[in-house]
Image (tube, rainbow, N blue to C red):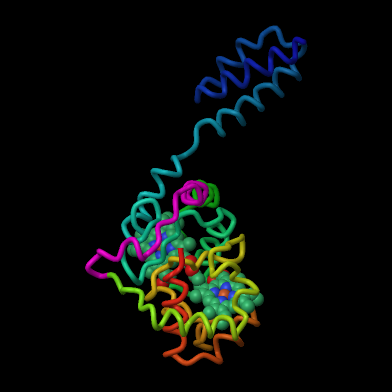
Amino acid sequence: MQLKKLHMLIVAGGLLAGTTFAVVAQAADAPSAADAEKAAKEAAKAAAIAAPPADGAILANTCAGCHGTNGVSAGPSMPTIAGMPTTYLQKIMADFKSGKRPSTIMGRIAKGYTEEETKRISDHLAKAKWGDSVSHANSVMATKVDAAKAKKGKKLVDAQKCSKCHEDDGLTQDEDTPRMAGQWVDYLLIKMQDFKNQHLTIPQPEKMQRAIEKLSLQELEDVAHFYASKK
Ligand code: HEC
Ligand code: HEC
């Protein structure tokens, strides 16, 4: 009973960052010194959780400069990252940071954050709502989705069995596989050209590499239009 009361005090105290010592003082009715010490440790832990170094939403403001507000990109060569699984975002950021994933700029950006900060940013972005490129088609920079190309792309995707992993026309996503339905045409095309480029060792499934290798640049463009046209 007494322990439970103590625990509640610690939790309440922990919510008010920096009140660790006050909590310990209040917990004077603790049964023993060892318990008090344990309580102090727990309070410090709770205070650390309650007082994050910076909020995910605030940290993610940096990303908005390129990836758009809340991760919905308004530019064709920049990927929308809103609503992607936090585990996927954290993994990609870690790969950029370590250099395992080649990048122009993301490696330097990712290096600026601790693992905990990256997690906060990813958690925030994962909760954001996806915005498809078609809805941004009023942007002056937008590449319009071409229905004829998208139709050809659909046939190619079926023939190459891309939907084995990119299910529901690229709508499905998980911790390894990003969403592609409604992503920007240009970005998808750039990414597939990168996958095809043997000199860039982007982490990718072997099956996908073999499938993409079979497609010409023209065909990859059709595929990009197909996925971009989906919502
Ligand atoms: C200065 C522009 C810029 C800023 C700021 C920026 N990015 Fe990027 N991001 C890029 C570019 C460009 C790429 C493509 C990879 C590359 O060339 O670096 C990219 C790629 C990514 C990808 C890979 C998407 C995919 O589907 O493959 C993720 C995830 C990502 N960025 C997350 C973030 C996060 C999180 C932040 C904020 C902490 C951020 N970016 C800030 C420019 C930027
Ligand atoms: C064996 C499963 C698998 C198959 C088959 C597959 N993919 Fe992928 N695809 C993935 C995974 C996993 C990723 C994420 C790779 C990474 O870490 O960047 C990916 C990423 C992509 C991306 C980049 C999306 C982004 O936002 O960064 C494109 C584009 C893509 N795939 C197109 C295709 C096409 C087109 C086909 C068929 C020709 C195909 N994939 C077949 C698993 C697969």
Q: Is residue 216 visible?
A: yes
What residue is drawn where x is 33% and y is 70%? 76
Residue sitting nearer the eye, 124 or 130: 130
Q: Does residue 9 sit above or below 52 in this rendering?
A: above
Up/down of 39 relative to 121, above or below: above
Q: Residue 28 falls in which quadrant of the image?
A: top right
- Which of the two residues, 102 or 127, is positioned nearer the viewer here? 127
Give the position of the N terminus as an image quadrant.
top right
Residue at 65 percent of width and 74 percent of height: 164
Q: Which residues lie in the magenta part?
A: 121-141
20 in the magenta segment: no
Query: Quick check: can you spot residue 203?
Result: no
Which residue reaches farthest left? 140
In the image, taking residue 67 as reference, residue 94 lies left or right, namely right
> Toward the viewer: 197 or 168?
168
Quarter of image, res 55: top left
**Whereabouts is ligand 2, in terms of quadrant?**
bottom right
Closer-to-camera residue (69/120): 69
Please tell me how many numbered marks the rendered image carries.
Answer: 0
- How far across and down, in percent of the image, does residue 196 sit? 51, 86
Q: Residue at image x 69%, y 14%?
A: 6
Q: Residue at x 45, y 81 (%)?
A: 151
Residue 124 forms part of the magenta stretch: yes
Estimate the x, y position of residue 222 in percent, counting from the top left. Answer: 43, 83
Horizontal and vertical percent position of residue 102: 48, 75
